[in-house]
Image (cartoon, rainbow, N blue to C red):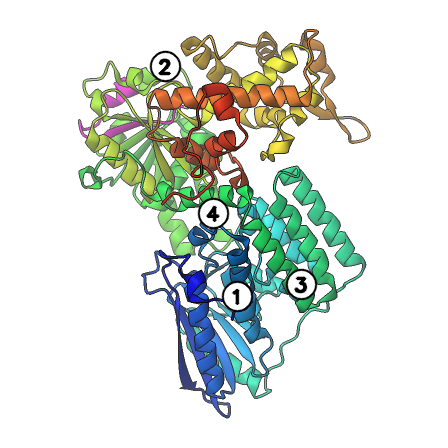
């Protein structure tokens, strides 16, 4: 193997995944099975990964296994985890391509020993299998998976990379090119979608799914049947002709629509899938090795690793959060409002906290409709097998409704999700205070209004806190927790504790208009709309940001957010910062006309500007090019981000990055807003300085 002490020394902080070999007797076969367990020595909160020392340990374990001359070799993981791939924190520190090449080749060299073994090899996937962990499993001849294994995926393209230890070659030759495109590109670029064991087995990634309580014993019995010939494993025939061509065309379409050419790693994944058509592992692995060595030296890779590091570390230890010991227990939740957002919140609280949740609204009909929505969503979870019937019944019993706010008397946490109008929210909180205890937390899901002003007239304003979710609530992981001027530490600590139980990534923000995500998006979108007002064609303005590879174009974002909501937030921002947030009379007319989208389709199915929108939108005679619109938007982002840091809206620039990654879908391969603005030169151009020190902005934090 091509890993030496010099290369290992490049990963001084590697949490080494050790591989341990034991030889076990298995009834039903002649000879014994060499069982290798990969384990990094931590509890299940830190999954096993492979750096150079980890690969060397697995290599040594394979030496021991082959020396025992067993009837079979099997690889499994520690409880709940098989393996989750390469040690990404170390990968970002590689300074020379030579070392990157060594590590890329070492992964192939070690895993390939299982593929080319004359002794049957098995992967017993007992838990999470991501990236290199899934490649380790694919390198074996046969695979079992536990029915409770979670997180099965190739997430590399989500990070701007590609599977580099055999994944692009082995997977399409096992399940076909089209399904491989789904796993490697489509799922990864669809918010890093995971597979469950049943789906993965149905695709042919695993040969069989086995029950979790006795998974290892059942896997050994299944392996014995394969070895002694009593069980035959059949694999799908792979079409390397037109079906492969069609799959590659679909891959290119996915890459183009999701990244617009902004992620070289995604484009490289498509190239590698094309190479895999011949089934030549020598050529395929050589191509993966060279491509991975190149990628590990790029800014895009370091940006993706920086983003990954933020979501894995900073998101789990929110900066500025009070001591968690100050948090109060939450044994009952109230939700004021029974509309769609309120229903989503009630469902989330009931599922994650497993405490009673009461909804209220202005009339019984709305309450009944809101409760029915939540109960219906719970029934859907049961129909999908994600809840047992007992679980469905128990969860539905937790969610009720009441016209009487006295039902909140024993609630510990009440969140409002009513109309976005200050007077309405103040009235709601004023009424609530007549019924709830002085310690009960009053949370607001406002997207832009002042938390402090909302609680200013209360007897206990210290228990008011911003709790800003992003829609859809069940999907987007960000939760902006807003500290008002008088919010106390106990309230804030309780908010963070609840956010953690809801499985959200919480970021502390100051009580400034629109907080973080909506403020940056409003500034950005406002510049694009202003360019259209001045005469730029809709088509030009909407394409202008494509080179960044953002998840959607500005006009599609406007449609998703809702023009009325976007206009309301913009008015809030204009009132606070009129010199930077302008008001578009065209957008106001657009909203007043009840329009929800700029685009429509003609009879031929082509996307065109809605003729009614074109008629009401009064444009000037100063059109900009795509480059000019993009330059204008990025200058505005650089300016607003610097002002927000100067105003202490968040603790550090990393929090701006984390918010945009998790709340706005900012691509991981761009590494967050501030590193991108640093790399592209806008930070210094607009502000005269970088957000982060040179050499740091694209690298993972320590």
Quarter location, residue 641: top left
- Residue 572, horizontal then vertical, whole percent: 44, 13
Estimate the spatial distance between the alpha carbons at disc 2 and disc 4, rounded to whole Å.
36 Å
As drawn, 646 above or below 551: above
**Which residue position is annotated with label 3?**
284
**Which residue position is annotated with label 4?**
379
Q: Which segment did they paint magenta?
A: 429-446
Q: Residues within 10 Å of mark 3 (few under 14, many from 20)?
A: many
Estimate the spatial distance between the alpha carbons at disc 4 and disc 1, rounded to whole Å.
49 Å
Q: How many marks?
A: 4
Residue at 32% x, 30% y is 651
**Front position in the image: 82 or 646:** 646
**Labels 2 & 1 near each other (Cβ < 8 A):** no
**Which residue position is annotated with label 2?**
422
Residue at 63% x, 18% y is 595
Q: Residues within 10 Å of mark 4 (few under 14, many from 20)?
A: many
291 left or right, relative to 495: right
As drawn, 416 above or below 287: above
Estimate the spatial distance between the alpha carbons at disc 3 and disc 1, rounded to whole Å.
15 Å
**Which residue position is annotated with label 1?**
106
Estimate the spatial distance between the alpha carbons at disc 2 and disc 3, rounded to whole Å.
61 Å
Between label 3 and label 1, give the one nearer the viewer.
Answer: 1
Of mark 4 and mark 1, the one earlier in the sequence is 1
């Amino acid at each position: 193997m091509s890993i030496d002490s010099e290369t290992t020394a490049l990963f001084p902080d590697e949490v080494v995944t050790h591989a341990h070999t034991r030889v076990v007797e298995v009834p039903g076969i002649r000879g014994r099975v060499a069982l290798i367990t990969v384990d990094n020595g931590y509890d299940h909160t830190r999954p096993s990964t492979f750096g150079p020392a980890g690969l060397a340990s697995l290599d040594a374990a394979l030496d021991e296994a082959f020396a025992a001359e067993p009837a079979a070799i099997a690889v499994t993981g520690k409880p709940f985890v098989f393996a989750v791939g390469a040690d990404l924190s170390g990968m970002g520190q590689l300074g020379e391509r030579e070392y990157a090449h060594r590590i890329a080749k070492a992964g192939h060299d070690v895993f390939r020993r299982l593929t080319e073994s004359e002794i049957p090899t098995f992967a017993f996937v007992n838990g999470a299998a991501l990236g290199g962990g899934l490649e380790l499993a694919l390198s074996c001849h046969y695979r079992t998976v536990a029915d409770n294994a979670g997180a099965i995926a190739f997430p590399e393209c989500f990070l701007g990379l590609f599977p580099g230890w055999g994944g692009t070659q082995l997977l399409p030759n096992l399940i076909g090119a089209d399904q491989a495109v789904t796993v490697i590109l489509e799922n990864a670029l669809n918010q890093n979608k995971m597979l469950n064991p049943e789906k993965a087995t149905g695709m042919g990634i695993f040969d069989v799914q086995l029950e979790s309580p006795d998974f290892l014993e059942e896997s050994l019995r299944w392996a014995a049947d394969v070895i002694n010939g009593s069980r035959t494993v059949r694999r799908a025939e792979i079409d390397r002709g037109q079906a492969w061509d069609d799959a590659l065309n679909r891959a290119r379409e996915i890459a183009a629509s999701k990244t617009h050419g902004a992620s070289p790693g995604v484009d490289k994944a498509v190239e590698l899938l094309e190479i895999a058509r011949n089934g030549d592992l020598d050529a395929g692995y050589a191509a993966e090795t060279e491509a991975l060595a190149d990628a590990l030296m790029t800014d895009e890779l370091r940006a993706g690793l920086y983003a990954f590091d933020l979501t894995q570390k900073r998101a789990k230890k929110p900066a500025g959060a009070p001591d968690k010991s100050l948090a109060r227990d939450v044994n009952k939740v109230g939700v004021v409002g029974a509309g769609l957002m309120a229903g989503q919140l009630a469902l989330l609280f009931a599922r994650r906290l497993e405490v009673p949740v009461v909804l209220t609204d202005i009339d019984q009909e709305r309450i009944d409709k809101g409760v029915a929505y939540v109960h219906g969503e719970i029934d859907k979870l049961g129909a999908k097998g994600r809840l047992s019937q007992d679980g469905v019944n128990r969860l539905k019993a937790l969610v009720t409704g009441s016209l009487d706010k006295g039902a909140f008397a024993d609630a510990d946490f009440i969140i409002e999700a009513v109309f976005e109008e200050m007077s309405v929210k103040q009235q709601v909180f004023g009424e609530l205070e007549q019924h709830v205890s002085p310690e009960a937390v009053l949370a607001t899901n406002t997207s832009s209004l002042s938390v402090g002003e909302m609680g200013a007239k209360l007897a206990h304003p210290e228990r008011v806190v911003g709790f800003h979710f992003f829609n859809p609530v069940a999907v987007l992981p960000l939760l902006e927790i807003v500290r008002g001027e008088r919010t106390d530490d106990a309230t804030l600590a309780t908010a963070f504790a609840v956010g953690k139980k809801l499985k959200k990534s919480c970021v502390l923000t100051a009580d400034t208009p629109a907080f973080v995500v909506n403020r940056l998006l409003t500034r950005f979108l406002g510049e694009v709309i202003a360019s259209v007002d001045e005469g730029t064609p809709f088509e030009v303005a909407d394409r202008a940001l494509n080179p960044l590879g953002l998840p959607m174009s500005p006009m599609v974002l406007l449609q998703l957010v809702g023009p009325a909501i976007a206009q309301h937030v913009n008015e809030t921002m204009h009132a606070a910062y009129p010199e930077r947030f302008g008001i578009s009379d065209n957008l106001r007319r657009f909203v007043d006309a009840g329009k929800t989208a700029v685009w429509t389709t003609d009879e031929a199915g082509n996307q065109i500007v809605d003729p009614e929108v074109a008629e009401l939108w009064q444009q000037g005679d100063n059109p900009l090019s795509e480059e000019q619109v993009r330059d204008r938007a990025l200058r505005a982002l650089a300016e607003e981000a610097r002002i927000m840091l100067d105003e202490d809206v968040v603790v550090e620039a990393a929090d701006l990055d984390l918010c945009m990654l998790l709340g706005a879908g900012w691509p991981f391969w761009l590494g967050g807003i501030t590193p991108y603005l640093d790399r592209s030169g806008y930070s210094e151009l607009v502000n005269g300085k970088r957000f982060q020190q040179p050499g740091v902005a694209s690298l993972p934090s320590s």
